[in-house]
């Protein structure tokens, strides 16, 4: 069973940066989909970015394009979300997620949505103050 655990998060001011980290374990696939989602109270959990661990392009939500970067360190099996130029509207609970069943095209083509997540992390709060 796949398990994911994220770390990072906290409070920053507008324009500052923050990096989230996520480690997945318990998988046997050589390549699979890793992603970040976020959720604010009363709203659905929305995809932020996703990456195919086997390489290739990444997916970004329009709201974070040019500011956020998802990456993976294969040596440590850690997936990162580098968030730059943070805005108050980025304030949310951020969740790391994994899916070992969907393919790379779905993963990086905007198809890694909440109902396709196989394993969720516990979430980490990101707060951006103006």
Image (cartoon, helix red, strand yellow):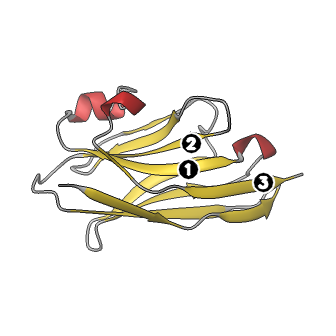
Name of the residue lying farthest toward the bottom: 76
Residue closest to the eye, 124 or 64? 124
- The x and y percentages for residue 95 are 49, 50
Q: CA distance from mark 3 to mark 1?
A: 13 Å
Left or right: residue 28 versus residue 97 is left
Under tag 2, what secondary structure? strand
Q: CA distance from mark 2 to mark 3?
A: 14 Å
Quadrant where the N terminus sits is bottom left
Of mark 3 and mark 1, the one earlier in the sequence is 1
Seen at 21% across and 33% down, the residue is 102
- The x and y percentages for residue 41 are 68, 37
Seen at 53% across and 62% down, the residue is 20
User: To which quarter of the image does residue 28 belong?
Assistant: bottom left
Q: Is residue 57 above or below residue 95?
A: above
- The x and y percentages for residue 38 are 56, 42
Camera sees residue 35: yes
Q: Are marks 3 and 1 in contact (CB under 8 Å)?
A: no
Label at residue 128: 3
For mark 2, what is the residue?
38
Seen at 56% across and 58% down, the residue is 82
Under tag 3, what secondary structure? strand
Of mark 2 and mark 3, the one earlier in the sequence is 2
- The x and y percentages for residue 35 are 40, 45
Q: CA distance from mark 2 to mark 1?
A: 4 Å
For mark 1, what is the residue?
94
How busy is the neighbourhood of tag 2: few (under 14 within 10 Å), some, or many (20 plus)? many
Name of the residue lying farthest toward the right: 130
How busy is the neighbourhood of tag 1: few (under 14 within 10 Å), some, or many (20 plus)? many
């Amino acid at each position: 069973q796949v398990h994911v655990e994220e770390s990072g998060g906290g409070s920053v001011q507008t324009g500052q940066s923050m990096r989230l980290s996520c480690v997945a374990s318990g998988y046997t696939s050589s390549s699979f989909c890793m992603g970040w989602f976020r959720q604010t109270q009363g709203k659905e959990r929305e995809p932020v970015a996703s990456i195919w661990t086997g390489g290739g392009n990444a997916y970004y939500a329009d709201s974070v394009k040019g500011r956020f970067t998802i990456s993976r360190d294969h040596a440590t099996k850690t997936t990162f979300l580098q968030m730059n130029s943070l805005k108050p509207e980025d304030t949310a609970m951020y969740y790391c997620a994994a899916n070992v069943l969907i393919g790379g095209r779905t993963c990086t083509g905007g198809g890694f949505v909440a109902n396709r997540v196989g394993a969720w992390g516990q979430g980490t709060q990101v707060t951006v103050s103006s």
